[in-house]
Image (cartoon, rainbow, N blue to C red):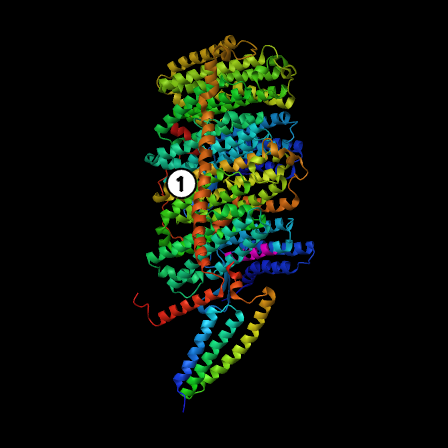
Amino acid sequence: MTIGLNAFLLVSGLLFAIGLLGVILRKNTLVIYMSLELMLNAVNIALVAFSRYNGTMDGNIFVFFIITVAAAEVAVGLAIIVALFRRRQSVMVDQLNALSR
Amino acid sequence: MEHDTNSFILLAAILVPLVTGVIALLGGRLNTSALRSISALGFGIPLIIGIYLFCNFDASLIGEYNFELRAPTGLESIGIYLHLGLNAISLPLFLLAGVVGLAAGLYAMNSKAERLNLYLALLLFMLGGLMGTFASVDVFFFYFFHEFALIPTFIMIGIWGGAGRRGAAIEMTIYLTVGALLSLLGLIALYVTSGVDSFSLLELRNYLSEQPLSETVQSNIFALLLFGFGILVSLFPFHSWAPKGYAVAPSGAAMLHAGVLKKFGLYGLLQIAYPLLPEGGEHWFSLIVWLALGNILFIGLVTIAQKDLKMMLGYSSVMHMGYAFLGLVTFSVVGVGGALLMMVAHGLSVALLFMLATCIYHRSQTFDMSAMGGLATKAPVLAAFFVAGTMASIGLPGFGNFWGEFTIFAALAETEHTRWLVAPAAIGIIISAIYGLRAVANIFFGQPKEVFVAQLESDTVVDLKLSEKVPALILIIALVITGLFPRLLSDNANSELANLYPVEDTLPHHEVMTLPSTTDAHKELTH
Amino acid sequence: MTATQTLLFALLTPLASATLIAFFLRRRGALASYVSVAAAAAIFVFTVLAIRDMGDEGIVASWDWLTFGNFNVSMGFLFDGTSATMLTMVAFVGFLIHVFSLGYMADDGARARFFGGLSIFMFSMIGIILADNLIMIFIFWELVGFSSYMLIGHYLNTEEAAAASKKAFIVNRIGDLGFLVGIVYAYWHFGTTNLSEMQGIILANSGLISATIAALLACGFIGKSAQFPLHVWLPDAMAGPTPVSALIHAATMVAAGVYFLIRIEFLFPDSIKCAIAILGTSVAVYAGFSAYGQNDIKKILAYSTLSQLGYMAAAFGLGFPGIALFHLITHAFFKALLFLGAGSIIHGCHHEQDIFKMGGIFKKMPITSITFLIGVLALCGVYGLSGFFSKDAILIAAGLQGNVLFAMLTLGAFLTAGYMGRLVWIVFFGKPKSKAAEKAHESGFTMLLPLVVLAALSVVGGYMNLWPEQLGGIIRGSKDALHHLDGYDAMHHTVLILGSAACIVGLLGSFFFYGVGATEDRLEKKAGPVYGFLKARLWFDEIYGYYVAKIQQRFANLLSVLDIFVIKGIFVRGTAGVVGLLGLGSKSLHVGNIHGYVYWFLIGLIFFWGVASGLFKAF
């Protein structure tokens, strides 16, 4: 039995929605960060699925780029979060509102 | 295009101050005397070049520029070249920048400003920008050099300004930026609507003289230029940046800005706006007239009410700009020529007065005129120079300002629709006499006021030092030269102005009966 | 040396002297004074040479000075009989006053400034005399105003001098406003401001005479010659050193206004001339009355000058410019003499100027007193002295033309004799009334010589036959014209009787009323209100003072407040306020919470999606 395109898109959509809700609702920067990754990977799934469906390599190449950029992003982002924690002793976004002042 | 040596000499007048400025800026460790000699070069050479070019100027090249230099900039596709040159209208202002630059530089070099090298560097940059402004044929560079000279002004006020500099600097910056922006919009609109694909003033002029823009377009663009340039020249009621700004500015910045940079706006109206958009000028005629009268009468009376010496000088310089506008609205060789004379002479006199005001402050420790008095007995030369500056600014014959004002009055009387303006405009000569002489009497004559007695007896009150005398004398001599020999300016400018402002001759030619003989003439009449 | 060059030298020598003093001799008062006196002597020599060489045609020369389009300013000389007469007087009297100043200013600390100022003044004055066009006259007109400012303010640490110099300059400027407007109107009306050309144009077409232009130009005269209503500066100007009062505020500069009128006589229609005659007559009487309320010897003489200037203006207005010039010249002689005499007395009395603190001067200073008395008699118009000839000619002209003017001018003659008599009896006779007067001493040679020479001129100056042939052509012309009028002889006799009566009544009346060597003003004691009225001089100074302090200054302050509150406050700050409110609004969107930004992001996304999908096209 082959699993159809729609199933992949459904999974991708679910993952994206979970990620989005996580970004909107959670207060811990680390969790928001992971939710962002979830959204990126949801997009990856969709891209791979489309690539397979269309029989071209375009989507796969795109995915490689996204993975590369995401890896770099993780490295920088985590470093920022660690630095932030060291300075403020907290990574909760409701406490990180210096810009409003 | 053929370049001769003089073109590169003209370029040098811009580059030398800039280069010496960079040296002064980077050479923070230079000892003071090296710093002074380097910046003296930067301040002096532009004037020497200006005088040299004045002597080699060929006034017969009507409608063209002397010493032209045209270098590519990488922006040729939209018609921007580094196009330099001088014509009979820009030449006097070029010289003015040189004279005031030298005086301001010499005065600043011997001042006790902190971070002297930065101060001198900024003044040099300003001077370089000024020389560039008046030497530009390309409208883009004309604007660019002006902005280049403007920025050091803000910085200098911010760092070395007097009390209340923050508010004044912000107000001045916003005003002047808005003014510059409006005029830039106007210039770009001119470029776009004319469709010449060139920012060269010459090409714009040639093209527009054959295919003038429609009246609506002309008046719209003219409005942008008028208000843009007008703000820069402190046209009433856009003047409120000027008195306060000059009051807090350090003397060097005030001298160069009030003396020279402010004339940029008038120069733009005179050289660009009026000749290219004559119908636009006509459309806005009555508004300009009323605003100029506002400058002369309203601001004149406000000047009378001032007690602070520098505020008074600032307001008086705003007031005198009204005359220049009145000269421009006549749209005649006489009026515009008068405005040109006025610009040069006013630049010299206002620079002199701002400088002397600082000299007075060093002795009195106050700018409040009602708390001085009797300074002339301790500092006679300072008093004499200040009287000379005041007399120049109130238009005493013998100084250039007189010719400017007189020629403008004469121009106003020429045609029927401006004739009524002579009397209200001439009331200004009374107003300026009142505030000028009051200032002189309050500061120098009579007995010192009670609060001033102790200060007057202190050792700091000495007569002008040599380092103050020399720059003042440079300015006074320049004023006297323009006053005694206005032909030096008018002979060159006459034909060029006639080319830019073509108007019909309205001078009446009456039949003259020859008299029997001059000695008997009165006898004959009385019989 | 051509005649033109001679004139140029006469004009430029004092300028060179002033420049030399200003730059090199500032601290060398003695040397500066010699340079200045030498320059004054040179002027006189050049004047004589120029008159010798002028010939019948006079000397005419012109140089272009400034040209813009059809506006052309030139500098030039029109040296004819009139200007030669005036120049001779100015050069000679000027030289004598320079010599007098050597003694008078000998112990002044700022002698160099004083003599430099005198030289500048001579330069400017000669410029007015020689000028061949209105613009050049105006230029030098302003320059004499400046030198007057500088010299009135000579004692610069006194409040009085500071205020007086400022007042003189500003009041003169008010007159110059009209003058200036008149010149520019005249330029476009006639196409020139050259005096001979304008005269030629009017000869060819007298319809071109314009009352407006004439009236405007006359404003210059009103300011400079201190006529109504701009006369207030002249009495105050006495704050300057006495030689300055003699030279500038009696003999030459104030008379330059009258000279200017004579130069442009052809521009005047009868209506304006008539107005000038009325103006001059009223000033003559007004100043005559005002002199009775003064105790300062110099101020009495100042009002006398005002009054005599009124006579000159009346002569001009009656159509006899030559007689105006005649009175100008004789007045210069005797009024310079009177001022210098007063200077000598003031110097002798250690700078005491109040006549009621003098007394008995005749015994202490005999030469000064005799010359002064000669001046007084000449001023009163005693038969045979110079003042007699010119003043009588004016009275005859008035008598032949209008009864009211004649009556007022005759009244003026009575007044003149009266206030001069008051001065003479109180100052010269009786006993000294202060220590200063007791210690009075006769002045030195340099001060007495000018007095003697001027006294001689005051005696013989009126005999036209003694004048050089080249000079006074216009005076002879006007006198001839007067002689040929109907009823001249009868009027001549009337005036002779009235004039002599005026002298006798005035001098004797003051003798009996005030008494010899009076210690206080009898008029003040007996008729306080009358004296108070005379002293108040119609409250001109008070009215102007009120205007300046209460109206002009308040108006200026009001405008200043408007400038700060309306333009700076409402417009500038208002604009800034609007921008600030916008900023506040957008600032409130800036929550600082990352979730807030995510919501904004989503809203933006939806908005752009809407735009892209054409959702807003309907609007």
- Residue C343 seen anywhere in this rendered image of the structure: yes
The span picked out in magenta is B121-134
Which element type, helix, strand or loop, lies under badge 1? Answer: helix
Residue situated in front as seen by the camera: C347 or A25: A25
Residue situated in front as seen by the camera: B375 or C444: B375
**Please, what is the three-letter code of the amino acid marked with disc 1?**
Val
On the rendered structure, is B294 left or right of C158? left
| Residue B366: x %, y % from top left | 59, 40
In the image, residue B36 above or below residue B358: below
Residue situated in front as seen by the camera: C343 or C238: C238
Tell me the residue at 43%/47% (across/down).
C571
Crowd around label 1: few <14 · some 14–19 · many ≥20 (10 Å): many
| Residue B102: x %, y % from top left | 59, 51
Q: Quadrant of residue C22?
A: top right
Which quarter of the rendered picture does the C terminus of chain B lie within?
Answer: top left
Q: Which residue is mark 1?
A: B422
Tell me the residue at 53%/80% (across/down).
A68
User: Which chain is disc 1 placed on?
Assistant: B
In the image, residue B383 above or below residue B96: above
- Residue B485 seen anywhere in this rendered image of the structure: no
For the image shown, how many numbered marks are present on the structure? 1
Tell me the residue at 66%/16% (across/down).
C439
Q: Residue furthest bottom?
A: A1
Q: Residue furthest left?
A: C618
C486 is within the stretch colored magenta: no
B126 is within the stretch colored magenta: yes
